[in-house]
Amino acid sequence: MSFPFNEIEFKRNAVQPVECIKAGWDLIRSQYWLFVGITLVGLLIGSLVPLGILMGPMMCGIYLALFQTRRGQPIEFGLLFKGFDFFGDAVVATVLHMLPMFLIIVPAYVLFYAGMFAVIGTTSQNGEPNPGALLGFFGIFGIIWLVIMVLLIVLSVIFTFAYPLIVDRRLSGLNAVKLSIRAALANFWRLLGMLLLTGLMTFGGVLLCFVGVYLVMPIGFAAIAAAYEQVFGLAEVTSNLPPPPPTFA
């Protein structure tokens, strides 16, 4: 059952970063290793095809498992692949996320290398590269890369709810992105705080020879699911079963 895009309400300033992480852990704790497996396989499959074509459906499968667990329904590993039921919408959301990233990163790389070769070609009086020009170039580009990092973080924040909305509210990819942007901006600083906390957890996993990354990432996804519930609430589940037969007194 899909929900009319304009009728879905969301709360402002509703995200509680620490509580989301706690709630995420409580959500997956009893089936932790199953979620580790789901997350690991989902990310590996998602990375097999360029441009994140498979990553969107895998993200939908992960959130489907999280929401089903939150509703008290049983889950199994194969639920990950139910994310392909949302393939078209998930790909649209992924492309809309990746496109601005490419538009930001690719020109920056081109300008960086073009500028670096131009500065190296600038020589001082003794015929060697001008150290002052090099220092100025790297200083300016350091600021540019800082701005780029801020833009990428903002993109990550505003797309946080796109896949959960596709799964829970059956929105189209475009409408899910639109609503995610609106809701994320209404909860921006709190949502940013939560993502920074989960990012620190992931960085801690990197320090453990990258193995720890896959141990903490399920908690990060579960925290996003908890934040989604704080902002939107979970949609009611409608059964596909026929109604029970009438009873007669």
Image: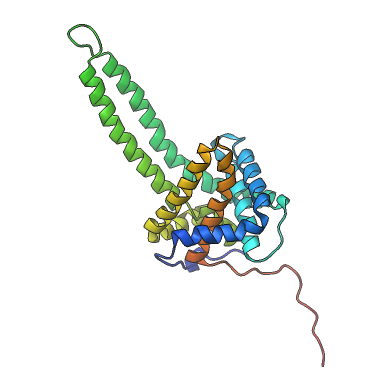
Most distant residue in the left direction: 125
Most distant residue in the bottom direction: 249
x, y (%) of residue 14? 43, 65
Q: Quadrant of the C terminus?
A: bottom right
* Residue 191 in which image quadrant: bottom left
x, y (%) of residue 123? 22, 11
Query: With respect to residue 113, does 58 lie above or below?
Result: below
Query: With respect to residue 239, does 204 lie above or below?
Result: above
Residue at left 66%, top 69%?
238
Residue at left 56%, top 47%?
216
Q: Is residue 212 or residue 27 the one in the foreground? A: 212
Residue at left 45%, top 51%?
197
Side (left or right) of 67 relative to 233:
right
Residue at left 82%, top 90%?
248
Residue 170 in sight: no
* Residue 13 in which image quadrant: bottom left
x, y (%) of residue 76? 72, 54
Total marks placed: 0
x, y (%) of residue 104? 38, 37
Residue 208 in sight: yes
Q: Is residue 1 or residue 70 the one in the foreground? A: 70
Query: With respect to residue 205, does 165 lie above or below?
Result: below
Side (left or right) of 142 relative to 99:
left
Q: Quadrant of the N terminus?
A: bottom right
Query: With respect to residue 244, does 165 lie above or below?
Result: above
Most distant residue in the top direction: 126
Most distant residue in the front direction: 208
Colour mapping used in the image = rainbow
